[in-house]
Image (cartoon, rainbow, N blue to C red):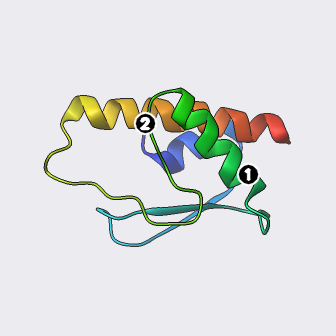
Amino acid sequence: LAVDGLAARHGVGIRQSGPAQMPLVLFEDDADTRKGNAFCAAALRAGAYFHPRHNMFLSCAHQPADIDLALQAADAGLAAVARMG
């Protein structure tokens, strides 16, 4: 699943923008970036660094295993946001 599918599975509202290789993921109702910070902290503990207020960057150096790890970390981050209510 892509991030939007993971977010839907967790019942978390997100907005995505930017080109596909530089996505920006923001959370609905998150003016103080509390959800974004929780997402990034949980994802970091799961092995991937994301930024709560800036585009993220993909490159040809990222291998399929890197993308899989990033999606697993995003899943952990989205679970943390879901627990916030």
Circle 1 packing at 10 Å, graded few (<14), some (14-19), many (20+), is: many
**Which mark identifies residue 73?**
none
Relative to residue 2, is residue 85 drawn left or right?
Answer: right
Which residue in the protein does label 1 denote? 35
Q: Amino acid at mark 1?
A: Lys
Q: Quadrant of residue 76?
A: top right
Task: Say what amino acid the circle numbered 2 marks.
Answer: Leu
Would residue 80 appear left or right of 41 to someone viewing this image? right
In the rendered image, the vertical position of residue 59 relative to residue 43, given as above or below: below
The residue under the point 86% across, 42% down is 85
Q: Is residue 55 visible?
A: yes
- Residue 31 lies, in percent from the top left, at 78, 69
Residue under pointer 2: 71
Residue 49 percent coordinates (x, y): 46, 43
Dots 2, 1 in contact, CB < 8 A: no
Q: Secondary structure at mark 1?
A: helix
Total count of labels: 2
**52 left or right, relative to 18:** right
